[in-house]
Amino acid sequence: MAAPLEKSPPLRSVKAPRSKHQGPARGERHRFWMWFTVCLAFAIGGYFWLTSARILGVPFDLSYGPRDPLFVQSVGPLLGSEFSSGNSVRTLINGERFFPVMLDEIRHAQKTITLETYIWTSGKISDQFIEALSERAQHGVKVHVLADGMGTLKFKKEDKQRMKDAGIEYMVYGREHWYTIKPNINHRTHRKILVVDGKVGFTGGTCIDDHWLGNADSPEVWRETQVRIEGPAVQEMQATFAANWLQTTGRLLIGPDYFPEAGHPGKVVAECYKSGPSEGPENARVAYLLAIASARKSIRIANAYFVPDDLALEMLVRARKRGVQVQVIVPAINDSRIGRAASRSRWGRLLEAGVEFYRYKPAMYHAKVMIVDDIYVTVGSVNFDNRSFAINDEDGLNMIDPDVARDHLKSFNDDLKRSDPLTWEEYNSRSEIQKGLDYLAGLLRSQL
């Protein structure tokens, strides 16, 4: 009898050994590009860190506060502007209040409208601005609009064309023609300026985007502060716009249509300064540090992106040592995770020194306000970070008046009621992973 056939073992697929001439496996390629991207990001960050303006490097003290005439005499010239009396200021909180006022001023313009913004996104509020600006342009009002290229990525081409067809001069900052190469892509205009007939001005953190609609009653709608001003300081605001218009187009805006004789409709002492790498480098940083050094009683900071550098940390700690109460409101909801982590990485020393931190809960907190000694207020486009202090073009409005300060204190205290306090114990109890991520994000703070 024939012996039974043995079953052959199942065939197994055998991978051919990878030739040394073949490329790396998929996983190896993935790791390579991951590390290449990380190294490239840090190399670019390091380059920007080294090339960012950090002129002022030594902490300083002032022997007088914002109520002292010496403060006005010093700060104005240092910032390349002058405090003027006779201004009228109105504080406007959230889009449901400031957008109707801004649009009403546009609709009543007789001669000129100048508007500079960082973000312009197509949508409901965009359509309202386009319609109002276009109507005035068609009736002979000279309308000039300057927007940032990066901030208008979601502004539809057809909406831009609608404005141009209506006679509006719409320009992208630093680029009169689409083919013009902007030398420094890291340099943005972050300014938010609207001036009507050279007499009425607006500034704050507001951009033209539906995020600013409403009353900050949900995470989708942002909490914002805007101010309306009449008086001599509006001429400085107009000059700030004109500087970037000149840089972009090579043309001056001049004459009584843009710079009419300034009236004195109020009693507020105010100045508007400009800041940017090519005009008043670090003016924004110097303005904030001067105000902190002048504080004798209190400093209240409400800021969307609070990422202080080492000098700002030192100045705030010095303020605490001389008995100044320091309160800071930051967003609990933030549109930038990296920005939020970088901000957190800077809070430890301040919390140890007794600085009070509060996290605003209802909506994205986008205010850019500082109140010193219940009399001095600064508001504008400036964030408390290196990008505003040293990289971007910014505008700031400084005001010395107890009534203006009272209005901002009211909104600050209202925001405190909607915010959760942060203790040192809670801050220090973050997980080690979170601390590490915050630290790494903090290394990139020069660009945030």
Image (cartoon, rainbow, N blue to C red):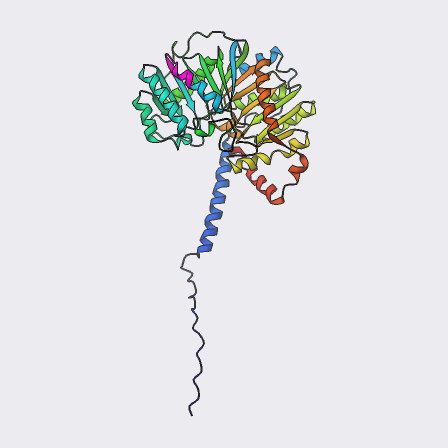
Looking at this view, name the residue that lies furthest to the left.
165
- Magenta-colored stretch includes residue 105: yes
The residue segment tinted magenta is 103-112
Q: Nearer the viewer, residue 20 or 97?
A: 97
Outermost residue on the bottom side: it is 1
Residue 207 at x, y percent in the picture? 45, 26
Which sits in the foreground, 166 or 11? 166
Residue visible at 42% across and 90% down in the picture: 2
Image side of residue 342 versus residue 247, left or right: right
Report x, y in % for residue 385. Answer: 54, 29
Residue 85 image position (x, y, % from top left) = 53, 9
Identify the residue at horizontal 49%, vertical 14% (top origin).
Answer: 229
- Give the quarter of the figure containing the N terminus: bottom left
78 shown above or below 339: above
Q: Residue at x 37, y 20 (%)?
A: 132
Picture quarter containing residue 147? Answer: top left
Query: Does any portion of residue 224 appear in the rendered image?
Result: yes
Q: Is residue 159 magenta?
A: no
Looking at the picture, how far across and down is residue 195, in whole percent? 43, 16
Residue 253 vs 434, above or below: the answer is above
> Residue visible at 43% across and 62% down?
18
Q: How many marks?
A: 0
The quadrant holding residue 428 is: top right
Can see residue 187?
Answer: no
